[in-house]
Image (cartoon, rainbow, N blue to C red):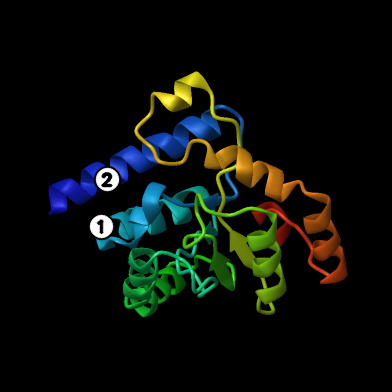
């Protein structure tokens, strides 16, 4: 386990070093498929956060959004919640910060403008990171092993829809990046 944890740390550190060496300043740390919920990965994330002065870490605990989310997604959300206290305790001990809320896991690959509007109207007070995967489905993406292909264009349309912008304005929602949270 120690050797594996060290390899995880070395790989994550190499990725952050490459970003920094390219002249970029990371605003936050997260992992693909929320693997930083696993203790060895979270340990590495916390160490790297301190070493590189990257205070923000993605909080991967969805607040319940959609009763129509597939049963298995709702189960994963609830199961991940069991790790919440340990996750936040470890981040706190390392001086890491998270948004107040997180949303999007249950909707990944399944939302359009109407669903996004429902999320926006249900946001609790405070900061919320909304995870999404907007884009275009290129031939290269079609060859990839991911279910998130055609849904990317649908998400992009939803995120740029006039009715969504109207709800953002009417609800008084301020769109910010992690850089602006600092």
Q: Nearer the viewer, residue 10 or 78?
A: 78
Q: Is residue 6 above or below residue 63?
A: above
- Mark 2 = which residue? 8
In the image, what residue occupies the spot 65% across and 78% down?
Answer: 124
Q: Quadrant of the N terminus?
A: bottom left
In the image, what residue occupies the spot 44% across and 26% down?
Answer: 142
Q: Secondary structure at mark 1?
A: helix
Q: Position of residue 40 (x, y in %)?
A: 25, 57
Count numbered badges in the picture: 2
Q: Quadrant of the C terminus?
A: bottom right
Direction from residue 10 to residue 22 in the image, left or right? right
Using a 10 Å C-alpha cutoff, classify the residue at mark 2 as few (fewer than 14 neighbours), some (14 to 19) or many (20 or more). Answer: some
- Mark 1 = which residue? 40
Q: Is residue 11 above or below residue 82?
A: above
Using a 10 Å C-alpha cutoff, classify the residue at mark 1 as few (fewer than 14 neighbours), some (14 to 19) or many (20 or more). Answer: some
Q: Nearer the viewer, residue 113 or 11?
A: 113
Image quadrant assignment for residue 178: bottom right
Q: Secondary structure at mark 2?
A: helix
Q: Position of residue 135 (x, y in %)?
A: 60, 35
The reply to whether the C-beta atoms of the residues labelled 2 and 1 are less than 8 Å apart is yes
In the image, what residue occupies the spot 30% across and 46% down?
Answer: 9
Q: Is residue 159 above or below residue 136?
A: below
Q: Nearer the viewer, residue 4 or 169?
A: 169
Q: Position of residue 14 (x, y in %)?
A: 38, 35
Question: Residue 22, can we see it?
Answer: yes
Q: Earlier in the sequence, mark 2 or mark 1?
A: 2
Q: Position of residue 52 (x, y in %)?
A: 50, 48
Direction from residue 115 to residue 42 in the image, left or right? left
In the image, what residue occupies the spot 39% across and 23% down?
Answer: 143
């Amino acid at each position: 386990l120690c050797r594996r944890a060290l390899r995880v740390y070395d790989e994550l550190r190499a990725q952050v070093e490459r970003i920094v060496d390219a002249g970029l300043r990371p605003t936050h740390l997260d992992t693909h498929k929320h693997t930083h919920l696993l203790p060895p990965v979270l340990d590495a994330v916390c160490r790297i956060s301190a070493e590189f002065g990257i205070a923000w870490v993605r909080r991967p605990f969805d607040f319940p959004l959609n009763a129509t989310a597939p049963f298995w997604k709702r189960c994963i959300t609830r199961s991940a919640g069991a790790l919440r206290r340990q996750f936040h305790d470890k981040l706190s001990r390392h001086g890491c910060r998270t948004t107040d809320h997180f949303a999007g896991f249950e909707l990944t690959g399944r939302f359009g403008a109407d669903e996004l509007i429902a999320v926006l109207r249900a946001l609790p007070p405070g900061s919320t990171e909304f995870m999404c995967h907007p884009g275009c489905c290129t031939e290269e993406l079609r060859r990839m092993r991911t279910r998130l292909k055609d849904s990317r264009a649908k998400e992009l349309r939803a995120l740029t829809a006039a009715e969504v912008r109207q709800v953002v304005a009417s609800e008084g929602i301020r769109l910010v990046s992690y850089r602006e949270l600092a």
